[in-house]
Image (cartoon, rainbow, N blue to C red):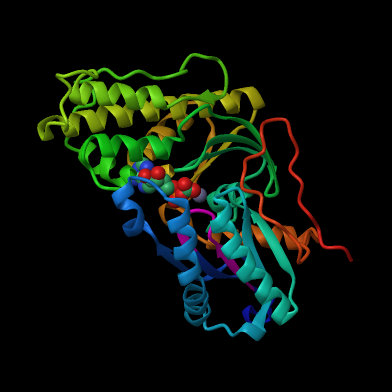
Amino acid sequence: MSNEKDLRVLLAIESSCDETAAAVVREDGEVLSSIIASQYELHQDWGGVVPEIASRAHLRRIIPVIREALTAANTTTDQLGAVAVTTEPGLVGSLLVGLTAAKTIAMGLRIPLVTVNHIEAHIYACGMGSTADIYPSVGFVVSGGHTNLYDCRSATECRLIGGTTDDAAGEAFDKVARILGLPYPGGPSIQKAAESGDSNRFQMPRPLLHSGKLDFSFSGLKTAVLYAARGVPGPKQLPETPPEIVPDLAAAFQQAAIDVLVHKCLLAAKQLNYSRICVGGGVAANTEFRKSMETATKKRGLTLNVAPPELCTDNAAMAAVAWELLAAGRTASLDADVLPGLVRPGRKRQRKTASK
Ligand code: KG4
Ligand code: ZN
């Protein structure tokens, strides 16, 4: 058995959206530290993430966050065996801050640079803390930026097979929270309000539920909440949602969104003939969604791996997937770039590998 002291450690950096995060992860998967500087307070007045505000906040916070992660892990820079960083997908300005920091560290310390796909990291997080092999599986990433289904053959081979045609599920939670006068981020606020609500009082649509395809649409659901809350557009539409109907509306919206998410996820497992489903991303922290996924998968004899709540929302610890890339010799070159967009179903992603 190897001595823990002999195991290599890497520094992971995540800045794809509105969390500046750094973690130190050992090659056996042990997370030695995980620091997250959230930007919620900077974006809450806008009801969503403002890209330029996010990039500037990353710039201010990235060095202190990295320092804190190293200190918390009791690790010095000369002990680092590699530096990993999220380079896709995400907000371009935000990704560039993390990548620039990582390149500087890799160059200064002469250690390998590993570029991480944020989606693959969200799915990898579903297996962290357990010894079970979670591949092959349906990977489901439900967050503020994504509602995507993947055919995951391994930690680094996740092929997009379906996704949202408009808003992401987390984005819908955030926008509906705004309509209901609840604080940002909307997911936790709606979950809390829904606890005392009756999900049957208001009838909400389940968009594309029976399309037979792995597609989602949440913008119509959001509009249905708006009309139920304040009335249709016109002189009689209320400027604000009456507080007494907020819990029932929150519960009705949450249930409608969950019904669609669960149904499509099961459909993907059926289409791929897979018996395992992995769910990650911020919305996977939702208690009712987790419960519904557990019940539905149990009923069909499927295995479910949901990321631990602290690894659902953005963090750098899940960039531990970099160890898989390192094992496969997939280090990146120092001219690596960011890839902000998602790769559409059927198209292959390019990952630039360092020339030997
Ligand atoms: O994964 P994440 O931190 O960032 C992205 O990659 O987007 O996800 C953030 C999203 C937000 O839209 C937030 O409202 C949602 O996840 N979220 C939740 C919950 N906690 C966070 N949605 C529903 N229920 C929750 N408990
Ligand atoms: Zn994310």
Residue at horizontal 56%, vertical 68%?
A: 30
**Can you give x and y, in whole percent of width and height, for residue 355 in the image?**
87, 63
Give the prevailing secondary structure in the magenta stretch: strand
Whole-percent x and y of residue 128? 55, 56
The reply, left or right, for residue 287 in relation to residue 52 is left
Say which of 225 and 70 sits in front.
225
- Along the horizontal axis of the image, is 111 left or right of 33? right
For the residue pair 247 and 289, the one nearer the viewer reads as 247
Residue 211 image point, x, y percent = 52, 14
Residue at 62% in and 43% down: 341
Q: Is residue 227 left or right of residue 72?
A: left
Q: Is residue 7 visible?
A: no
Choose between 66 and 271: the one closer to the eye. 66
Point out the stretch of residues depicted in magenta: 10-20
- Above-or-below relation of 99 to 63: above
Q: Quadrant of residue 251?
A: top left
Coordinates of residue 237 in the picture (x, y in percent): 17, 22
- Determine the residue positioned at 38% across, 33% down: 292
Q: Is residue 192 magenta?
A: no
Q: Residue at x 43, y 43 (%)?
A: 284
Q: Quadrant of residue 19?
A: bottom left
Q: Quadrant of the C terminus?
A: bottom right
| Quarter placement of the N terminus | bottom right
